[in-house]
Amino acid sequence: MNVLEKIKSGITYCDGGAGTLLQSWGLMPGEYPETWNLTHPEKIIEMHRQYLEAGAQIINACTFGANRLKFDNLEEIINAAIANAKKACEGFNAYVALDIGSTGKMLEPLGDLPFEEAVSIYSEVVRIGARAGADLVFIETMNDSYDAKAALLAAKESCGLPVFVTCVYDEDKKLMTGADPAAMIAMLEGLGADAIGINCSLGPKQMLEIVPDFIRDASVPVIVNPNAGLPRSENGKTVFDVGADEFSDIMCEIVKAGATIIGGCCGTTPEHIRKTVEKAKNLPFALPEKKNRTVISSYTHAVEIGKKPVIIGERINPTGKKRFKEALRQNDINYIVNEGLAQNKKGVSALDVNVGLPEIDEAQMMVSVIRALQSVINLPLQIDTVDPVAMEKALRIYNGKALINSVSGKEESMKAVFPLVKKYGGVVIAVTLDESGIPETAEGRIAVAEKIIARAAEYGIGKNDIIVDPLAMAVSSDSNSANITLTAVKALHDMGIKTSLGVSNISFGLPSRADVNAVFYTMAMQNGLDCAIINPFSQEMMKAWHCFTALTGMDENCADYIEFAESLAPVQVQTEIKPSAGLDGCIISGLKEQAAAAAAELIKTTSPMEIINTMIIPALNTVGKGFEEKRVYLPQLLMSAQAAKEAFDAIKSAIPAGENKKGKIVIATVKGDIHDIGKNIVKVLLENYGYEVIDLGKDVEPEAIVEAVKSSDAKLVGLSALMTTTVPAMEATIKLLRKAAPDCKVMVGGAVMTEEYAEMIGADSYGSDAMAAVRFAEKTI
Amino acid sequence: MIEIIKSAAAEISIDPKEVAVYLGYYSANGIDPKIIDECIAEVSACASYKACFAKVPVTSEGSIDIGCLKACGKSLQKNLEGCDFAYVLAATTGFEVQRLIERNSVISPLKGLVTDCAGSAAIEAFCDKINSALDCSDFLRPRFSPGYGDLPIECQKGITEFLNTSKNIGLSLTDSLMMTPVKSVTAIIGIGKEKNECTGPGCMVCRKTDCPYR
């Protein structure tokens, strides 16, 4: 019987804590237990044997912290660890797990470990462990969903062994980086974990509270490995407060609640396991039911599709949007992220992400945008692309279980998309068209849907991970088109198939499109539509959704509707914003709205360049001077900068192309530095003064900075570093720049910088603050 | 023995005046208090305060040398003078605060800046609370962190490994020894035997006399 058959045949027991036991045998604090595989193999074997004798059936080889960041002799350690565990298992019917813990480093964007680097670190461990003969891979004590994804992906890619994953939850049922059980279950099951669960941090009592969350959502066996309660100090020794009797009693409750793979973590001993095995062995065994729900997730939560209609915000898409296209061409990721933030505020449940433009590298842009979005917005994302390369790159780095838009009934499409859905997990939108086009009848579209679902099944993708889009077509060109779509929605709904629509196509070519869209949307929801890609800034659409959910009993006490309706109440007639002290006065006082209003008024009579040169820049100079003389503080400087920006925006369209662009400046926080508040302030001010700023972000490789300078032909670079540890990276960047772009000047700044330091590393200028950067730019360009 | 403590956001009060000081003001006057209050509220709403600490012996040379943790230097020695023991502390506001700062910086640089300062005030307030909790019978010296005086920043490594902060409170280091979550503190706190004259506000013992925080 292999381990997968074993966990499906009855309650399976894991081992308990290793650290506490080894410490009592002489392991020093701070000493790596993994090295004992080589130096004290007999003790490691003895530890395993004690757990096996207590009844453990899966034992974790002593490889928890074994990875190349900690060990130069990784292969030797893992080989010895697996060999020790196997030796201990002689005479027992037990399985040896390659134990994988976190690298201890935080993944980007919260830390500095790139996702693919993490995957590579874990892959190396898995390859060695699998070769050494482990029976399974046990990924445990994961604090972060992204880290867990990297490890699981590595395991699936590097071996064919079963993979178990347990994470560390808090009393508030969340991982350290925010994910709840539902989000983790969606992601881990999507990636193909064979069993999932909880370990460490909490005692059995607290874990008992979380088990129902797992049983409610999980379809694979659930693992529970608690600590022996909380640690406390007794005569200088660490003891845990839950003894073997109490522990085993609660473990029985945990089994009754539905967990089928149980053991212990920190502080638990062979005695804890022995008593648990004794008491739990006669308890009834039942695996979790297969849930067949349609679930997507982000790095904090899951969204189930099939209950309340789900709104997917459509605004991250260049189609028909000039400003958005411009942002894509200029790599203005902030603009795109702001589109996401604004939709989030409107109450969407997921964000569609489409960044396809013929003239840009879509795969690269998709990766940048998803990284940026998932570092600040916790909504699940819908990866919207026809390019399979972009789709795979996006799915790889996505921190959760994504929506994928889309697959069609074309063989080519299904062949490209289904392997990705299977490998990375995800819910895919299936559009009902194939080689012969879009069927003209509801039956025809349903037939395509059924074909897609059947084909997906061959790849091992369940019906629940497919959402059919029966296509809304312009009613202006075929008066029956709405009927066909609605009939298809209803029929699919009755067949238990989830549906989605890009609603606004229906009104193409008609006046007052928003009204048509909203009524069609309502009709579709009434027919069972599960989700829709809509514009959340359309009041008509949001009204339709709120009214529908209130009227169909999905909005308890109509609370959401009432809140929404109140937000629509006409705001008291705004007193007309009158520029009180002229445009320059508004900028000096940092009054955004007034500055914009004043500029809009002035542009009627004055040329844009005159406004800029006689009002905006002098006002900025006044504030800047005050800042330099320490009469004005940074927040005021920023408020003025924002007011100036609003004024610029108000007159921007009138500025003749090419004018007021003073020159290009590349700015970045150097490699290794993850703080960029200061750099962002410098950016705003430079933009104010008319420079075109190419912002490369933070933690930027020297090569990337050089590349940007060369491709933009910028004559000035601004570098920021916060700590002494990142100044060498700054120096390396300057050296590289000197070689590749000798006529480009370099200014530096940041908390640790000083005039002398700047000189030492070869910079042209040291900026003590943002205004100093502006002054140097004025001198240089 | 490493102890872990957690505080509910409601237990930590972030002082707007402190935020104003971080923003460069000597008092809260002169900046719109609304934006400070708003950012404090947002930080409070998402902070997850966690800390871990251990009591360790101080060597006769006034340094710390236990397992992977080695911390020494003239300024630390001065700080630990007369102490037989010290606490080694690591504390954090959690990843949601880091994400909030990032998010608000995208929305507006001003809001980003104020949130960043509110985060700094939050971690200081949390550390103060831990200090006073530990202070019941001992006389604690000012918190002394890697990077202060001649205590090298590399000392972060020893502290985080010794306290296993990555596992215990989610705090880890980047290759350049920056902490994530960003609003975190590591420190050594001397345990004095009597009320020592240097227990005054941290800033006043510093030798940099032209600093605006004084």
Image: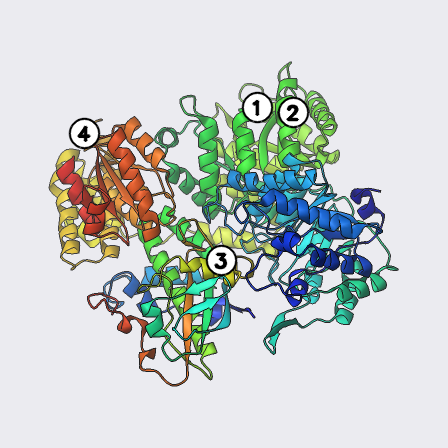
Residue position for label 3: B171
Marks 1 and 2 in Cβ contact (< 8 Å): yes
Residue position for label 1: A473
Q: Compared with residue A759, is residue A661 higher up or lower down, i.e. above or below?
A: above
Tell me the quadrant of the picture where the C terminus of chain A can be found. top left
Q: Chain of mark 3?
A: B
Q: Position of residue A135 (x, y in %)?
A: 75, 43
Viewer-side residue, A535 vs A55:
A55
User: Do tags 1 and 2 sit on the same chain?
Assistant: yes
Q: Chain of mark 1?
A: A
Q: Compared with residue A181, is residue A431 higher up or lower down, i.e. above or below?
A: above
Q: Is residue B39 left or right of residue A79?
A: left
Q: Residue at x 29, y 28 (%)?
A: A710
> Disc 3 residue type?
Leu
- Disc 1 element: loop
Q: Residue at x 62, y 16 (%)?
A: A437
Q: Earlier in the sequence, mark 1 or mark 2?
A: 1
Q: Compared with residue A634, is residue A76 higher up or lower down, i.e. above or below?
A: above
Marks 2 and 3 in Cβ contact (< 8 Å): no
